[in-house]
């Protein structure tokens, strides 16, 4: 199962973690994993290149798990809300369409 954690601060989302393989299909053929990966990578591109955060984005990747953990500056959370909420809601849609393969939780950080 892919476990997604959304990290919330006072001003909005401040981080996201996606961990594990959904298990719906074999690695390399799993549309659920591909959809989650595409959204998380789109978030990274949006943060780094569109919002121009560059080095302000912290990203940890471990292909063996698989794991991707992304954090962005808390002080920019409010202005990044449109981008981060769009990705979060899209991930929630995937989770609702594929229960048992993707779970999402939110934590205050």
Image (cartoon, helix red, strand yellow):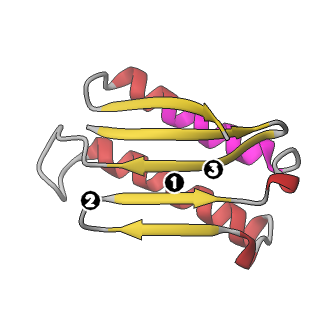
Residue 18 rendering spot, x and y as whole percentages? 43, 49
Q: In this view, does 38 lie to the left or right of 28?
A: right
Picture quadrant of residue 90: top right
Question: Is 52 above or below relative to 84?
Answer: below
Question: Is 71 above or below relative to 17?
Answer: below
3 or 1: mark nearer the eye: 3
Report which residue position mark 1 lands on. 40
Mark with earlier residue (3, 1):
3
Picture quadrant of residue 107: top right
Question: What kind of secondary structure does the magenta stretch mostly adopt?
Answer: helix
Q: Is residue 93 left or right of residue 84?
A: left
Report which residue position mark 3 lands on. 15
Report which residue position mark 2 lands on. 65
Mark with earlier residue (3, 2):
3
What span is in magenta?
80-91
Question: Is 80 above or below relative to 47?
Answer: above
Nearest to the observer: residue 102 or residue 93: 102
Q: Residue furthest left?
A: 26
Residue 54 rendering spot, x and y as whole percentages? 73, 77
């Amino acid at each position: 199962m892919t476990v997604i954690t959304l990290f919330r601060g006072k001003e909005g989302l401040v981080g996201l973690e996606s961990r594990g393989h959904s298990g719906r299909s074999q690695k390399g053929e799993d549309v659920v994993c591909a959809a989650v990966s595409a959204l998380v990578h789109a978030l990274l591109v949006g943060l780094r290149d569109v919002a121009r955060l560059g080095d302000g984005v912290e990203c940890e990747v471990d292909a063996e798990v698989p794991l991707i953990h992304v954090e962005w500056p808390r002080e920019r959370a409010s202005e990044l809300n449109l981008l981060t909420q769009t990705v979060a809601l899209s991930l929630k849609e995937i989770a609702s369409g594929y229960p048992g393969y993707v779970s999402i939780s939110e934590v205050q950080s």
